[in-house]
Amino acid sequence: MKKLPDAEFEVMQIMWKNQPPLTTAMMMQQLGAGCDWRVQTLIVLLNRLIDRGFVRSEKKGKERTYYPVVGEAEYLHFETSMFIERFHRNSVTHLVATLVDANKVSDSDMEMLTRLLEDKGR
């Protein structure tokens, strides 16, 4: 698996939050008015995702439908592992220390992390 460029990741987020199959029209609607992509841009991105093995498509009549092949949890696990390895010397402790030092961990986050670690230790 390889890291997705931002535009392809945006398409995958749409696919993950909706029930497949999806059409380009459905995805364009999800992208909304704030996105200046044309349908052809979306089709190019979908074809790249097909080539990378993230998406599959089927032709039904004149319309093509799309299905995610890689799940959100699977991709986020990959990205998180790569991030920790690349930027934190493969150390979760280093990652957490960085977040704490940057004041990015709230008290409720700390409580939740403590509970997760306690539950995992049982």
Image (cartoon, rainbow, N blue to C red):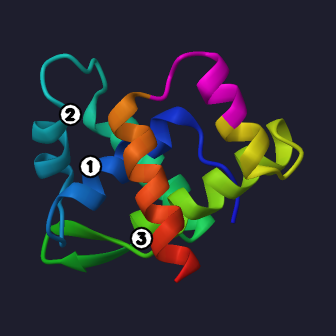
Residue 101 vertical position relative to residue 25 in the rendered view, above or below: above
Residue at x 38%, y 51% (from the top left corner)? 112
In front: 73, or 23?
A: 73
Of mark 1 and mark 2, the one earlier in the sequence is: 1
Horizontally, residue 29 falls left or right of residue 91, namely: left
Rounded to the nearest angstrom, the CA distance separating label 3 from label 1 is 12 Å
Verify whether residue 103 appears in magenta.
Answer: yes
Disc assigned to residue 31: 2
Residue 99 vertical position relative to residue 111 in the rendered view, above or below: above
Indicate the secondary structure of the residue bearing disc 3: loop
Residue at x 61%, y 16% (from the top left corner)? 102
Extent of the magenta region: 97-105
Rounded to the nearest angstrom, the CA distance separating label 1 from label 2 is 8 Å
Residue 1 on image: x %, y %: 69, 66
Q: Residues within 10 Å of mark 2 (few under 14, many from 20)?
A: some
Of mark 3 and mark 1, the one earlier in the sequence is: 1
Residue 48 on image: x %, y %: 55, 54
Query: To which residue does mark 1 refer?
Result: 14
Query: To which residue does mark 3 refer?
Result: 71
Of mark 3 and mark 2, the one earlier in the sequence is: 2
